Amino acid sequence: MSWSSYYKKKDLNHAGIVKELKQIPGISILDISSLGKGCGDILVGYRNLNFLFEIKQPSQKNKFTKAEKYFHLSWNGQIATVTSSKEILQILNSFSTPNNQ
């Protein structure tokens, strides 16, 4: 089996979203897209909370691999599918409360 069969292809908007988020003070970001197995693409820390995001192209937002479907259904924590940094910021702010600051 070749190395390319182990490579998880990133969506085209992935790099831009990560770059934009890294510019925002108070956000920690870990790119975990290489883990594969459907686990999501980035882990974001914000106001003492952790958020898991699956990044998709807008036209592919509801298309998941078999591994992604399994992970999303079996994961007992938060995971959100997003297409932009704006969507991520909306989610981060919706979970933020004065107790998390």
Image (spheres, rainbow, N blue to C red):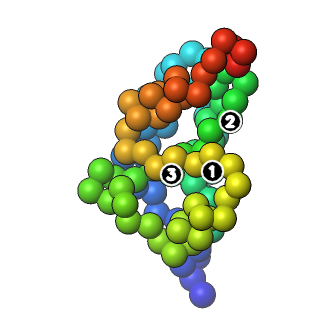
Q: Residue at x 57, y 16 (%)?
A: 25
Q: Amino acid at mark 2?
A: Asn
- Around disc 3, counting alpha carbons within 10 Å, would you say few (fewer than 14), some (14 to 19), or many (20 or more)? many
Which is nearer the N-term, disc 2 or disc 1?
1
Q: Amino acid at mark 3?
A: Glu
> Is disc 1 placed on a helix, strand or loop?
loop
Query: In the rendered view, would you say 52 is above or below 5?
Result: above
Figure quadrant of residue 6: bottom right
Q: Position of residue 11 (x, y in %)?
A: 40, 55
Q: Residue at x 40, y 53 (%)?
A: 56
Which is nearer the N-term, disc 1 or disc 3?
1
Q: Which residue is mark 2?
A: 50
Residue placed most toward the observer, 24 or 4? 24
Which of pointers 2 and 1 indicates the residue nearer the eye? 2
Residue placed most toward the observer, 100 or 16? 100
Residue placed most toward the observer, 41 or 23? 41
Which of pointers 1 and 3 indicates the residue nearer the eye? 3
Q: Residue at x 47, y 71 (%)?
A: 65
Q: Which residue is mark 1?
A: 32
